[in-house]
Image (cartoon, rainbow, N blue to C red):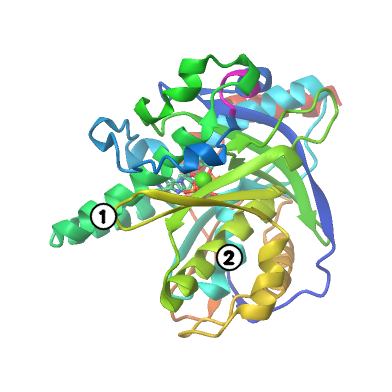
């Protein structure tokens, strides 16, 4: 069985379900995952705090790079078993199965949403069906190999390699400078004033799990959230409007840099849109990695901006949020229509640069993926318990 989805397809049903956070979980500073929502919100969710006076101090975003606690690529792939543990915990509280057609990570859906605009990048996904639902994972082993090869190649250009490393660090340094580990009122003066001396680490991570969807397809997406703008509402209050995505970018001095930024902003829009995050904060740095200014965007702004500004470039169509969503809607529909959930099956979904299509093929790797790669013993046991109870 081979089925191909043309990248030009567009759905006319882009009716969106309003994203709703169901629960959250987190990775602790030591790299271990934990599935308790309360703990993730109390201990592992940061708060935005960066008054203009601090931006004026011209922080060096490369400062302290020698002490960077950088998690290895191998340990930083999206972790399905940890995600499923958190789903089990949520379902045990609710006493029922989460109603979603597709269960995956936000980053994977970002890849699908942006596919027609990134025709030079391959997409390689693994799909399992279980209990009537579709689980989608990135082929991380392949991605890690490609990334290691890229890094190896980059070594021939030490200046560029150093710059790439510093840019990656600068992003996490900006997060460290712009956030507090607790709401402002609960922080000591030292915690607030000594952030520029703090060791930067990317081990800790807060993950929000959001139910949303388009047309008839319901998706459950897990995605990393950087921090909270003001406060976390109590009880049943909607937390999504309080979340913030943090980014850094080169400050814009030339038309070429403006174009580069536009591309970045398109990706950021996609990331935020998928989780229902409404605020984006960009820290702009100069060539010496000095933080020069900070801009806050509403996630609704880029679509309007692109409508007025976007220019076609290269082989990819001009960035257009509405068209991207029509493609995304078509892709979701096509996945649920062509992936058979009536029994346990495994597929690969691949895009090869230059091919013009998204290709679904059945795979014989199901047993391996079912055994701790995508599904976990604990999750399947829980779902069996639920099925016999109802
Ligand atoms: O290849 C990897 N190492 C990836 C890991 C790729 C994509 C995701 N992940 C992990 C994340 O660390 C997280 O545990 O999956 C989980 C869920 O992430 P997501 O929200 O679905 O991922 P995505 O939307 O692609 O990216 C969110 C954040 C990034 O923030 P920025 O502001 O840079 O977009 O996940 C991290 C990063 O903090 N992240 C990565 N970190 C290191 N290397 C990478 C990467 N290639 N990709 C995403
Ligand atoms: Ca970020």
**Residue 141, image x and y in percent?**
37, 49
| Residue 266: assigned label | 2
Q: Is mark 2 within 8 Å of ligand 1?
A: no
Tag in front: 2 or 1 = 1
Residue occupying image coordinates x 51% and y 81%? 316
Is residue 113 positioned above or below 274 on the image? Answer: below
Q: Is residue 82 magenta?
A: no
Tell which circle, 2 or 1, labels the residue nearer the N-terminal end. 1
**Residue 214, image x and y in percent?**
79, 59
Local SS, label 1: helix
In terms of depth relative to the viewer, which is nearer, 239 or 325?
239
| Residue 27: assigned label | none
In terms of depth relative to the viewer, which is nearer, 62 or 147?
62
Q: Is residue 3 visible?
A: yes
Residue placed under numbered mark 1 in the picture:
163
**Residue 30, image x and y in percent?**
40, 21
The image quadrant that residue 74 belongs to is top left
Residue occupying image coordinates x 48% and y 42%? 55
Which quadrant is the N terminus positioned in?
bottom right
Q: Is residue 131 visible?
A: no
Is residue 191 positioned above or below 177 on the image? Answer: above
Side of 204 where 385 appears, left or right: right
Q: Is mark 1 within 8 Å of ligand 1?
A: no
Local SS, label 2: helix
Q: Which residues are magenta?
A: 41-46
Which quadrant is the C terminus positioned in?
top right
Is residue 194 positioned above or below 113 on the image? Answer: above
Number of residues whose C-alpha sits closer than 10 Å to that of mark 1, classed few (under 14), some (14–19) or many (20 or more): few
Residue occupying image coordinates x 32% and y 37%? 72
């Amino acid at each position: 069985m081979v089925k191909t989805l043309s990248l030009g397809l567009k759905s006319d049903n882009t009716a969106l379900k309003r994203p709703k956070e169901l629960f959250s979980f987190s990775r602790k500073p030591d790299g271990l995952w934990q599935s308790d929502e309360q703990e993730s919100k109390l201990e592992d969710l940061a708060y935005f705090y960066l008054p203009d006076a601090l931006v004026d101090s011209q922080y060096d975003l490369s400062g302290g790079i020698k002490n960077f606690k950088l998690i290895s690529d191998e340990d930083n792939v999206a972790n399905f078993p940890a995600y499923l543990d958190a789903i089990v915990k949520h379902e045990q509280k609710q006493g029922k199965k989460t109603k979603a057609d597709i269960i995956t990570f936000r980053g994977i859906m970002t890849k699908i949403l942006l596919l027609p605009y990134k025709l030079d990048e391959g997409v390689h996904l693994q799909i399992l069906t279980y209990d009537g639902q579709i689980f989608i994972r990135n082929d991380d082993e392949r991605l890690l190999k490609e990334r290691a090869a890229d890094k190896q190649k980059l070594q021939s250009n030490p200046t560029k390699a150093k710059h790439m490393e510093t840019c990656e660090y600068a992003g996490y340094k900006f997060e460290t400078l712009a956030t507090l580990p607790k709401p402002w009122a609960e922080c000591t003066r030292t915690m607030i004033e000594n952030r520029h001396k703090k060791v930067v680490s990317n081990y800790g991570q807060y993950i929000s799990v959001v139910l949303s969807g388009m047309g008839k397809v319901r998706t459950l997406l897990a995605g990393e959230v950087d921090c909270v703008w003001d406060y976390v509402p109590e009880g049943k209050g909607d937390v999504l409007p309080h979340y913030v995505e943090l980014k850094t970018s080169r400050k814009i001095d030339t038309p070429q840099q403006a174009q580069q930024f536009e591309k970045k902003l398109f990706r950021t829009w996609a990331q935020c849109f998928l989780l229902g995050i409404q605020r984006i904060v960009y820290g702009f740095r100069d060539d010496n990695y000095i933080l020069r200014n900070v801009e806050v965007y509403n996630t609704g702004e880029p679509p309007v901006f692109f409508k007025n500004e976007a220019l076609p470039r290269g082989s990819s169509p001009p960035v257009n949020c509405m068209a991207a969503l029509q493609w995304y809607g078509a892709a979701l529909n096509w996945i649920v229509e062509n992936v058979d959930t009536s029994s346990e099956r495994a597929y690969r979904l691949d895009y090869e640069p230059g091919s013009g299509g998204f290709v679904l093929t059945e795979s014989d790797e199901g047993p391996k993926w079912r055994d701790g790669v995508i599904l976990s013993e604990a999750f399947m046991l829980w779902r069996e318990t639920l099925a016999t109870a109802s």
